[in-house]
């Protein structure tokens, strides 16, 4: 008897397309001469044991950057860098590179990750940089259940930082806001899920482990004019964007395996219709799940209807005293796991449940979850 398929709703590192697993596994065994193209001769060595400055890896690295422009819509005016350290390092690198005495660095606080970015900016200011960290809007008081409206921004703001999608609370900007100051965007959890207007960001970054590949690679795109700005004294070379750009993204040894997988994922997105096709598919998955939540008397969506994420759907179980809700949630998660629906436990900040349905997550997995939810409610 065939084993029950497991659908992985983990918030990240998240699932990858099956085709990507196969091609990445082949490269681990032996990389092909031009990177990995089918039919090309092998080089006799694994991707994992060759120099990051070798010609075979150079082909992989260059293709990943070219596809980032082509598939994701990053304009040629922006340098693409494949760095390490995740979004967490970018929280610090951005103000380290661009905060000057008296500067206003503006932030929209929409959840845990934007709060961390705000904290890093304030830490750097406390270290003597002398800039002002301005929180221009926040949804903290309502439990981060919506995307707050942006007010008029200071005309002399150095930038506005925002997080396009919030994995923990399940909220998302429907469109990239158009503002009169430069944008800095953390797009870690929804990049590649739809056309996003990435060209509007002077600086953008995304950890790969949601929609682009495995953990350990961070896609950064930065307007080339910003690379020419004077960096304050005292910033180590490795924390300067220009250092990496001048070295062709190879200032230090990159995550070679992660770069390969990122390239393969972007090829998969391109082959399946690009970000436009991803958008339609992701909307269909999210709509089905939100319809199940809205039509239920047991499940309570966390995010307001006008701010709902298409990547991370969050809800709690209501309709019972608090003590009973906790037990009911545990039973829901246990029975879901037994049915092959894994990774549905919500973050401790929200509790309840969370279904992360990134690009590679299959439609049939959402269908199975919706059916399971209906049956669980019927029996509850």
Image: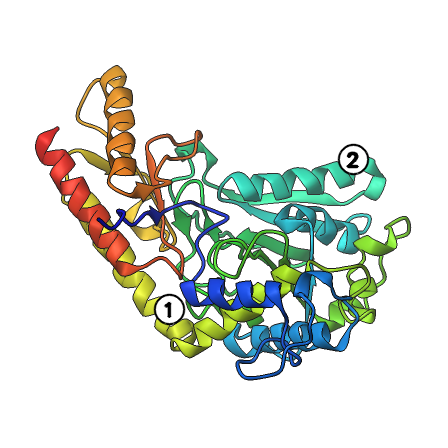
Which label is found at residue 126?
Answer: 2
- For the C terminus, the quadrant is top left
Q: CA distance from mark 2 to mark 1?
A: 42 Å
Please provide percent x and percent y for residue 276.
Answer: 38, 74
Please provide percent x and percent y for residue 363.
Answer: 27, 60
Q: Earlier in the sequence, mark 2 or mark 1?
A: 2
Tell me the element at label 1.
helix
Above or below, 145 against 43 in this view is above
Front residue (pair 182, 269): 269
Res. 183 visible in picture: no
Front residue (pair 67, 123): 67
- Residue ID for mark 1: 278
Above or below, 214 against 74 in this view is above
Above or below, 71 against 286 in this view is below
The residue under the point 78% across, 71% down is 248
The residue under the point 41% across, 41% down is 169
Does residue 341 appear to the left or right of 69 in the view shown? left
Q: In the current view of this chain or complex, which residue is farthest to the top?
A: 323
Tell me the element at label 2.
helix
Q: In the current view of this chain or complex, which residue is farthest to the left?
A: 378
């Amino acid at each position: 008897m065939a084993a029950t398929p497991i659908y992985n709703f983990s918030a990240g590192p998240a699932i990858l397309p099956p085709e990507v697993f196969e091609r990445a596994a082949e490269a681990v065994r032996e990389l092909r001469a031009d990177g990995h193209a089918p039919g090309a001769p092998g080089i006799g060595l694994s991707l994992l044991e060759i120099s990051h400055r070798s010609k075979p890896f150079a082909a992989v690295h260059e293709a990943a950057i070219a596809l980032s422009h082509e598939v994701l819509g990053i304009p040629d005016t922006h340098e693409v860098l494949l760095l390490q350290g995740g979004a967490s390092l970018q929280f610090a690198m951005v103000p380290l590179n661009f905060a000057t005495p008296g500067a206003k660095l503006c932030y929209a606080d929409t959840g845990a990750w934007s709060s961390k970015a705000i904290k890093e900016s304030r830490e750097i200011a406390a270290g003597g940089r002398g800039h002002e960290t301005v929180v221009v809007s926040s949804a903290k008081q309502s439990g981060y259940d919506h995307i707050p409206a942006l007010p008029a921004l200071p005309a002399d703001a150095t930038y506005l930082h925002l997080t396009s999608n919030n994995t923990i609370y399940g909220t998302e900007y429907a469109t990239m806001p158009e503002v009169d100051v430069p944008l800095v965007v953390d797009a870690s959890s929804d990049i590649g899920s739809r056309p996003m207007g990435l060209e509007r960001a002077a600086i953008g970054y995304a950890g790969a482990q949601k929609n682009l590949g495995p953990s350990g690679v961070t896609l950064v795109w930065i307007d080339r004019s910003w690379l020419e700005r004077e960096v304050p004294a005292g910033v180590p070379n490795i924390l300067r964007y220009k250092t990496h750009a001048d070295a062709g993204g190879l200032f230090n040894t990159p995550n070679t395996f992660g770069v390969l997988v990122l390239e393969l994922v972007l090829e998969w997105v391109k082959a399946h219709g690009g970000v436009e096709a991803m958008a339609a598919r992701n909307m269909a998955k999210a709509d089905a799940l939100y319809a199940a939540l809205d039509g239920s008397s047991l499940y309570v969506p966390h995010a307001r209807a006008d701010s709902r994420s298409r990547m991370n759907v969050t809800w709690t179980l209501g309709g019972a005293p608090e003590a009973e809700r906790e037990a009911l949630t545990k039973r829901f998660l246990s029975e879901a796991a037994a049915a092959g629906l894994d990774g549905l436990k919500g973050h401790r900040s929200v509790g309840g449940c969370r279904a992360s349905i990134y690009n590679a997550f299959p439609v049939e997995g959402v269908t199975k979850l919706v059916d399971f939810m209906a049956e669980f409610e019927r029996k509850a």
